[in-house]
Amino acid sequence: MKAQEEYLIRFLDGANKNFVIPVYQRNYEWKKEQCEQLYNDLISIVNDDYRTHFLGSVVHLYNQYGRSTNTEFLIIDGQQRLTTVTLLLLAIHNVIIQENVHFESPNLAEKIMEVYLINKWSNEKEKKIRLKPIKDDQQAFIRLFDSSLQVIEDSNITENYRYFYNRILKQEITIDNLFRAIEHLMIVEIELQPNDDPQLIFESLNSTGLDLTEADKVRNFILMKKAISEQEFLYNKYWNNIEKNTNYDVSSFIRHYLTLKERKIPNINKLFKEFKRYVSIKNIDLVELLSELLTFSKYYNYIINANSSNDKFNLVMKRLNNLENYTIYPFLLELYDDFSSGLLNEEELVVVLGNIESYVFRRLICSIPTNTLNKTFMSLGREIKRFDDYTKNYFSIFQYLLIKKEGNQRFPNDAEFKEAFKNRDVYNFKAKNKTYLFERLENYGHKEKVKVEELISENTINIEHIMPRKLTPQWIDELGTHYQEIHDKYLHTIGNLTLTGYNSSLSNRTFKEKKEMKNGFDDSKLMLNKYLRTLNSWGEKEILNRAENLSIIAEEIWEYPIVNYERKIDNELIYSIIDESKDFTGEKIEAYLLGDKKFEVDSWRDFSVSIINVLNDHDSVKMRKIIQSRSQYNNLLTNNISFNQIDLRKPIEIFHGAYIEGNTNTKTLLQILKQLIEVFDYQEEEIFIVLKSDRK
């Protein structure tokens, strides 16, 4: 194996040279976002006085068994980069030939075509085009070279070629400068020898054992462009401390940080790409970014380790961590940053954390799906800051927004919570949640705290079924005629569960024995056993009474906020598209908010067309597949969007050649859009609807 630095353009150059993607490779998968990044990098090369830009590695093996007179290189790794640059070169050539654009280099189009794209004098038709992608990609690629053939629409090859073609037409830089920038793309060319095993090398290059973590890639991205001395300074001042603050799990921290900044959860496996895209789009100075990351890593340290200077904060934060709901972390980062900025005081900060604790636990007890929590907390900070008076009323607005959540985002009220608390199977909770529940109940209102979590982990105390899991004849007699119904209904509920240090001794003894035996309930100093000491029997009535008493305590522990804040009418006209409780029937839409942008629309139809075009621009290949694959997706979606007008009763064009059903009510239309957004894995919580203020 030989490795050397080489300019990509020189690697492509050479008479009778072909590049073959082996059949065992994946298809070409780069999309618009990668092409956009490459083009932006090329513009940066021009603006930076044509600095060299490292594109990555290309691993190849000479195909000594090929029957062609051409030299064939099997591309083991780097096909995505190689294919993308080839598409860009083809787009440059075709823009020169087909469009009236200015360029200075003589014969540039001919040079690109004959030196880098085709083997002009090849007698073999299939070897004429130098790059040979695999499977469907090859057919799409070939058709771009022949204007007489219809292009294959459903292909990333075609879409990325069009992206480059249209981007070149914008003339952000001249064609000459664009080609010159391409000449400054550098690769590491790794040439395998005949005795090398390409599959083993491919696996080693991509193995999880040797891969950099996403955080490693972020670190290198930030530091590698700096001089060695500056790298050491920045590492010691910032990065090393970020690692310590995050308990050396920087990837998770950066994921929460990006979620806060972009209001969407990045794929953990694409974290570096998302980070790099974020930096590029925002045009962020990397040293300033390091400084902010260090600041937020300190907040993160307070959160995950519950070790701030505020003991009350630490106490609540430890309980929140015991609930193991990490979807709240991005908001907690924002919350602590807002606290540091003076938007709320220490007392309010602690109350907010308590409200979040109650919100999360009440929802757990009421069996509300947890998959909406990430959406709730991703957008909550932005919702607060949409209020004109948030700088003065941050705390009140937070509470107001939380109790106004409805549907699967709701904060269960006292009635719903108490009813669920009495009847929920809490014994089969996750161990951490179950321990958390009994610790809170046991220690509520007492200065002398019992270390329930520690004692359970040491197996010093256990959670005991008062009415045992296996009924004996004595228990059947005690429970009465409906013993089986009582057992099935109440066995794992809070009314029948307690804490004891003598679980194995108590076992399935009768209630009287459990109560009066040595170290039984009568001898217990635990608060949870106080009621049991007053009883002589145990049955349905006693279980219900105990559940009711504990539910009253639970209502106080996990309290529901009392909010006096009144919202201005103008602010009430803004609703999230995912607000399940809001019926938009009869309402008139004025605009919608997407991220930081506001789009004026005239009607719900106009809104739907606009949103679908946003999604199409995000990934047009996926949009085409969704519309064409009418049986693969939800019928509501595929029955209302089509490329064929006759499929619809009242077709409305959304973009060229695509139509949506116009004969639908507002509710159905929004359901269609939500399903489409979900299929796209787009962050719909970022879309807010603005209604007209003159609605009836």
Image (cartoon, rainbow, N blue to C red):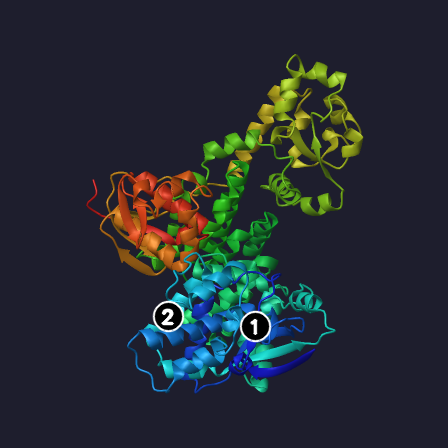
Residue 267: x, y in percent?
53, 58
Most extreme residue toward the left, as rendered? 694
State the CA–CA distance, disc 2 to disc 1: 23 Å
Q: Residues within 10 Å of mark 1 (few under 14, many from 20)?
A: many
- For the residue pair 636 and 44, the one nearer the viewer reads as 636
Nearer to us: label 2 or label 1: 1
Q: Looking at the rendering, in which quadrant would you find the C terminus? A: top left
Residue 333: x, y in percent?
50, 60
Q: Amino acid at mark 2?
A: Tyr
Q: Quadrant of residue 310?
A: bottom right
Question: Does dot 1 land on a helix, a strand or a loop?
Answer: strand
Q: Quadrant of residue 135?
A: bottom right
Query: Does 617 appear above or below 692?
Result: below
Residue 326: x, y in percent?
55, 52
Residue 655 visible somewhere in the drawing:
yes
Task: Name the residue carrying label 2.
Answer: 165
Residue contact at pointers 2 and 1, CB within 8 angstroms: no
Residue 154: x, y in percent?
43, 56
Count of picture labels: 2
Q: Looking at the rendering, in which quadrant would you find the N terminus? A: bottom right
Q: Residues within 10 Å of mark 2 (few under 14, many from 20)?
A: many
- For the residue pair 464 and 377, the one nearer the viewer reads as 377
Mark nearer the N terminus (2 vs 1): 1
Task: Name the residue carrying label 1.
Answer: 19
Say which mark, if any, is on residue 140.
none
